[in-house]
Image (cartoon, helix red, strand yellow):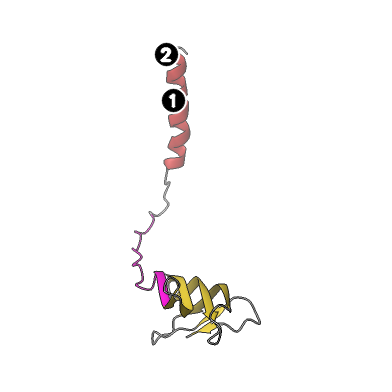
Amino acid sequence: MSCSTVVLLLLMISAGSAGAQSTGGVAPASPEVPITPSPLNGNWNITGNRQLKQFPLLSMHIQLNGTQIIAHGDHFATCPDDPRRGGGGSMSVSGEIASDGSFTLTTRRPGNTFQIT
């Protein structure tokens, strides 16, 4: 590739990007407002301990966006009369934080009554 070809390519690239950088009277973007992470964000072991075989077990990952809460987790419970028998599974719940700070999480699927308050 000759030196003149390289110079021509550089001029074409710089001319093409110059138009994209023009603001042409458009107001500058407002400064970003920093988003403060919520202390609710993260993994929560709400009750139980799988390693110590303490049931019922409820463990969730919670993410807060404004006043909206989205959570995904696992639940498992055993029968008191026969600890080898039990059931559980995964879940997705969501809710909204009220002005007093309280919230209720319910499942996204209609007809499912799993609720955390």
| Residue position for label 1 | 11
The mark tally for this picture is 2
Check disc 2 and give the amino acid type.
Answer: Cys
Whether tag 1 and tag 2 are in contact, CB under 8 A, the answer is no
- Residue 27 screen position, x and y as percent: 40, 55
Residue nearest the observer in this picture, 27 or 111? 111
Residue 30 position by quadrant = bottom left
Q: Which residue is drawn at 46% across and 20% down?
A: 8
Q: Residue type at mark 1?
A: Leu
Q: What stretch is highlighted in magenta?
A: 29-46
Q: Position of residue 48 (x, y in %)?
A: 43, 78
**Label drawn at residue 3:** 2
Label 2 packing within 10 angstroms: few (<14), some (14-19), many (20+):
few
Q: How far apart are marks 1 and 2 (CA)?
A: 12 Å
Q: Where is residue 57 in the image (x, y as percent from the top left)?
A: 48, 77
> Which is closer to the viewer, label 1 or label 2?
2
The secondary structure that most of the magenta stretch takes on is: loop
Q: Does the magenta stretch include residue 12?
A: no
**Which of the numbered marks, if any, corresponds to residue 68?**
none
From the top left corner, tell me how far across and down residue 64 is, in percent.
43, 71
Was residue 34 drawn as part of the magenta stretch in this picture?
Answer: yes
Above or below: residue 106 compared with residue 71: below
From the viewer's perspective, tell me whether residue 108 is left or right of residue 5: right
Of callouts 1 and 2, which one flags the residue occurring earlier in the amino acid sequence? 2
Tell me the SS state at disc 2.
Answer: helix
Nearer to the camera, 17 or 108: 108
Label 1 Cα neighbours within 10 Å, binned few <14 / some 14-19 / many ≥20 = few
- Residue nearest the viewer, comparing 97 with 46: 46
Give the residue drawn at x 42%, y 86%: 102
Location of residue 102 with respect to 70 vertically, above or below: below
